[in-house]
Image (cartoon, rainbow, N blue to C red):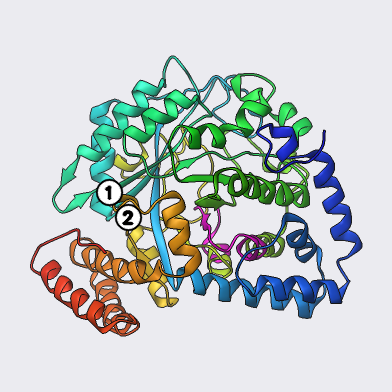
Amino acid sequence: MKYDMKSMKAEEFINDGEILDTVRYAEEHKNDIALIDKILAKARLCKGLSHREASVLLACDNKEKVQEIYDLAEQIKKNFYGNRIVLFAPLYLSNYCVNGCLYCPYHLKNQHIPRKKLTQEEIANEVIALQDMGHKRLAIEAGEDPVNNPIEYILECIRTIYSIKHKNGAIRRVNVNIAATTVENYQKLRDAGIGTYILFQETYNKKNYELLHPTGPKHNYDYHTEAMDRAMEGGIDDVGIGVLFGLDNYQYEFAGLLMHAEHLEAVHGVGPHTISVPRVKRADDIDPTEFDNSLTDEMFCKIAACIRIAVPYTGMIISTRESAEVREKIIRLGVSQISGASRTSVGGYCEEERPHDTEQFDVSDDRTLDEVVNWLMRSGYIPSFCTACYREGRTGDRFMELCKSGQIQNCCHPNALMTLKEFLLDYASDDTRKIGEAMIEKEIGNIPKEKVQQIVRERLTKIAAGERDFRF
C-alpha cells in the first residue's frame, strides 16, 4: 500500500513501508551534521517536524547535537507550557476484559486475578477519596467487555463522578481511556461531557500487533488504529494517543506515533491533544523481560525530547509507571502532565494499604499527592489542577490555535496559581503550604499583564475566604 497521511485507511496513514524507509534513512543520516543542523533550525521555529526529520534527530548519536536536542526540547516546552505541570489520577472502574493482550494482566485467560467491577456507590467512595487528596482531573479506565462494561455503564460512571461534591472537592474533568468503539458511542461520550478520549495504539507494527492481541475485538488492527478518526467524527475535539514502548522496536514506534499525529492534523485540522509515553512494566502474570524491545532510561528521555520538538503543541504525559528519578529527568524535556498518587487497581483508593491483586501494572512512584506537589515546587514547577480550557470551550482547534500562538499561557498561568491555592488551603501539609504560598507570590509577578495580576490577587483573596473555582 502507498503512504498517504490523509487516507482514512490505517495501513495507508500508518504505512509499514514508509516507516521502514524512515528508520533506514535516519540510520544513514544520523551523523550528517549539516542535515541535523538544518532540522534543528527548522525545529527552532516551533512549527514542528515531520516524522522523518524527527527520526533523524532520534538516531543522532553526536553528543554535542544530542545536547542541542535536549536544550531545544526544554526551551520549546517552556515556550508552550511554561513551568506548569498538570496533575491527574487514573480511576480503574473494572478489570473485566474479553481480550487476550499478552502484555496486560487483565487478559481473558488470566484465571487467578480477582475480577472486579465497581458499583456506583463504590465509585462515589473512590471519587471522595481522590477529592480528599486534592485531585480535580481523572482518567477513567476499564477493560473491554460488552457484557460487564457496556457504554451505558461507562456513561453512568461519568455521571456519578461529576455529581460527587465532598467538602471543597469536585472532579472538574473526566478523561476516558476505554476500548475503540463506534461513532455513535463517541457521540454519547461527548454528550456526557468528557475531556479527552485516550487510546493507546500499543504498537503500530501491524504484524506484531496481531501477535500481541491474538484474541478478542482488539485483535482488529485497522478498527483500533482508526478509532481517533471515529472519535473526532463523533464530535470529540480532544484525543490522546500513545504507544507502549517495549513491545516493538522503538524507532518503528516513534515514527508511527508521529505519523498518527500528522494524519490527525492533516485530516481534522487538529493534532493529538496529548501524547503518552508508557513503557511495559511488570504486572500480575506479565514479565517485561519477555519482550525484547526494552529501552534504556536515556533513550526513553531522548524519545520524549524528540516528540516535544516534533509536536510542540501537544500535551505530553508520563505516569507513575516510571520512577521518581526518571520522571524528574523527563519532565524538563517535554512532559506537561503527570499522574500523582496513582493506584492501578480496581477500588484501590479506598484502601489504606495499596492493594496489588487487581493492579494493571506495578507503580514505581508511590509518593502521596502532597509529596508530588511538594517535589514539583522544589524543582521549580507550578503544580496545576486547572481544567478551565475544557470547561470554557477551549478544545480542539480553538485550543490548538491558542496553544500554537502561545496565547494559552495568558490563561494557564493564572489558572495554575489559583488551583494551586485551592490545594494548599484544602489539602496540603504545612511544609507544602509554606513552599506553595511563596511560589504563588513569586509567580504572580511573572504574569505579563498588570490587570491580570490584579484580578488574580483579588481572586486569591476570595479563595482564602472560602470561594472556589475561579478561572480565566
Q: Are marks 1 and 2 in contact (CB under 8 Å)?
A: yes
Q: Which residues are magenta?
A: 305-326
Q: Secondary structure at mark 2?
A: loop
Question: Which comes before the other along the chain, label 1 or label 2?
Answer: 1
Kindly tell me whether residue 82 is visible in this rendering.
yes
What residue is drawn where x is 43% and y is 36%?
235
Q: Position of residue 138 (x, y in %)?
A: 36, 46
Indicate whether 421 appears above or below 20: below
404 vs 173, nearest the viewer: 404
Which quadrant holds residue 148? Answer: top left
Q: Which residue type does callout 1 highlight?
A: Arg
Q: Is residue 253 left or right of residue 142?
A: right
Indicate whether 52 appears above or below 458: above
Q: Secondary structure at mark 1?
A: loop
Q: Position of residue 428 (x, y in %)?
A: 25, 65
Q: Which residue is mark 2?
A: 387
**Within 10 Å of the Cα at label 1, are there few (<14), some (14-19), or many (20+) other Cα atoms?**
many
154 vs 259, nearest the viewer: 259
What residue is drawn where x is 30% and y is 81%?
449
Single out the residue that lies furthest toward the right. Answer: 28
**Image quadrant in which the C terminus is located:** bottom left
Indicate whether 217 appears above or below 233: above
**Within 10 Å of the Cα at label 2, are there few (<14), some (14-19), or many (20+) other Cα atoms?**
many
What residue is drawn where x is 85% and y is 46%?
20
Q: Which residue is mark 1?
A: 172
